[in-house]
Image (tube, helix red, strand yellow):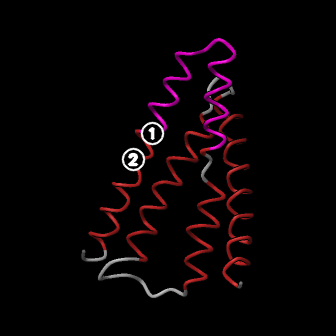
Amino acid sequence: MIGLFYVAIGGSLGAVLRYLLVNAAARWAGDSFPYGTLLVNAIGCALMGVALALFSGPHAVAIREEHRLAIQVGVLGGFTTYSAYALDTLELARTGSPRLAILNIILTNALALIAVITAYRITARFMGG
């Protein structure tokens, strides 16, 4: 039951961080394309790769399970925005920008995979794996 509390606290922190970053990106780059959602997903995937390398394998950092849950399920789960990504993509397609919708699909998925793989490898190598 304590794990649920940690996930809830982490999730609320992740959601607030996502909100702040998405809005900052919109102010900086405009809102014609969901740059903030793209950025949040790439950063979130990279951080998930770091967390995976840190918390698993032969050189894992000792961490209490509820803290791991708070970070991976809570903070990073609340921070990443695949549901917002799906909504942004649908809205681009629905409002007459199918090319931007396709671009969003390609960029989001490519950057997410690159981020998680790269962050995992760098962190694992840093830890001696």
Magenta highlight on residue 52? no
Please indicate whether residue 57 sits to the left or right of residue 106 in the image. left
Residue at screen point 64% across, 21% down? 92
Distance from the alpha carbon under mark 2 to that under mark 1 = 6 Å
* Residues under numbered marks 2 and 1 in contact, where contact means CB atoms less than 8 Å apart: yes
Please name whichever residue, 58 or 94, is drawn nearer the observer in this view of the structure.
94
Give the SS element for disc 2.
helix
Q: Give amino acid for label 2.
A: Leu
The residue lying at 67 percent from left, 60 percent from top is 14
Which residue appears at 61% of the width and 28% of the height? 89
Q: What is the quadrant of residue 97 in the picture?
A: top right
Residue at image mark 2: 113
Can you give x and y, in whole percent of width and height, for residue 67 in the image?
59, 81
Q: Residue furthest front?
A: 1
Asked if the stretch drawn in magenta spans residue 95, the answer is yes
Q: Which mark is residue 14?
A: none
* Quarter of the image that includes the C terminus: bottom left
Looking at the image, which residue is at 31% across and 63% down? 122
- Predominant SS of the magenta segment: helix
State the extent of the magenta-drawn residues as a range: 83-109
The location of residue 19, given as percent across then percent down, is 73, 49
Which quadrant: the N terminus? bottom right
Neighbourhood count class around disc 2 (C-alpha, 10 Å): few under 14, some 14–19, many 20 upward: some
Location of mark 1 (residue): 109
In the structure shown, which secondary structural element does the residue marked by tag 1 occupy? helix
Asked if residue 115 is positioned above or below residue 63 in the image, the reply reads above
Q: Position of residue 2 (x, y in %)?
A: 70, 85
Quadrant of residue 74 within the rendered picture: bottom right
Figure label count: 2
